[in-house]
Amino acid sequence: MVRQTQDSQHPLPFGHAESSAQQAEDPGAGNAEDARGRPGRPRIWASEAERKRAYRERLAADFAEPERLRRELRAERQKVADKDRSITRLRRELARAETASIVAVSRQHDLEGTIEGLEAKVNDWRSRAQALARRREEERAERERVDRRSTASRGPAPRLELPNLATKGQPPPPARRKPND
């Protein structure tokens, strides 16, 4: 049997006359709350068996209470240990996440530096290509001016005759003779 908690407040004195009248009529049927809550003369039991039973119940409640408290304490300690493990696990995960974040930020800065370097190289090569294209255009324009001047001063270019490649590597044909008349 679980021990009942006692009320921390004592009953008020002006209701006392009625309860003492009831106890005077039936001393064994007194209010249990009044008997437990008040200091003074012990309760008068109706029989010795009832007194012993009440004693055994109080004794069992007294012994049961520490066991219940021990069980509650073990349960609460288990909860605290679980919470501590959970906190430790979460702290490890937080440390890993912070480390991963630092690594990611560092990698991002490295990649941004690489991108800037590559963009600088691209701009350099682009400017070189544009300069080369301008130089080639100027050289071509210069060649065209030189060619126009040289063709104007020489006159029309002589017509070149191409060699006959069909006879290449064969002996020349015999010379033609004039018929005798």
Image (cartoon, rainbow, N blue to C red):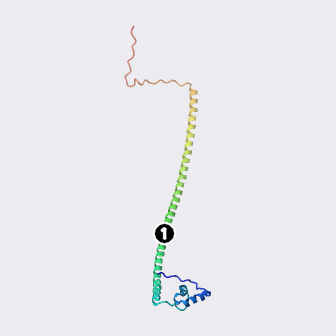
Residue depicted at x 56% and y 42%: 130
Residue nearest the observer in this picture, 15 or 57: 15
Seen in the image, is 63 located left or right of residue 24?
left
Q: Is residue 92 above or below residue 54?
A: above
Residue 86: in sight, yes or no? Answer: yes
Residue nearest the observer in this picture, 57 or 140: 57
The furthest residue to the front: 25
Residue depicted at x 62% and y 87%: 14
Mark 1, other Cα within 10 Å: few <14 / some 14–19 / many ≥20: few
The furthest residue to the bottom: 41
Residue 39: in sight, yes or no? Answer: no
Q: Is residue 33 above or below residue 75?
A: below
Residue 136: give x, y in percent of width and height. 55, 38
Residue depicted at x 45% and y 84%: 60
Instruction: Report the label total.
Output: 1
Residue depicted at x 56% and y 40%: 133
Residue 166: give x, y in percent of width and height. 40, 24
Q: Is residue 10 above or below residue 121?
A: below
Quadrant where the C terminus sits is: top left
Indicate the amino acid at tag 1. Answer: Ser
The furthest residue to the right: 14
Query: Label 1 belongs to which residue?
Result: 86
Residue 98: give x, y in percent of width and height. 51, 63
Say which element carries label 1: helix
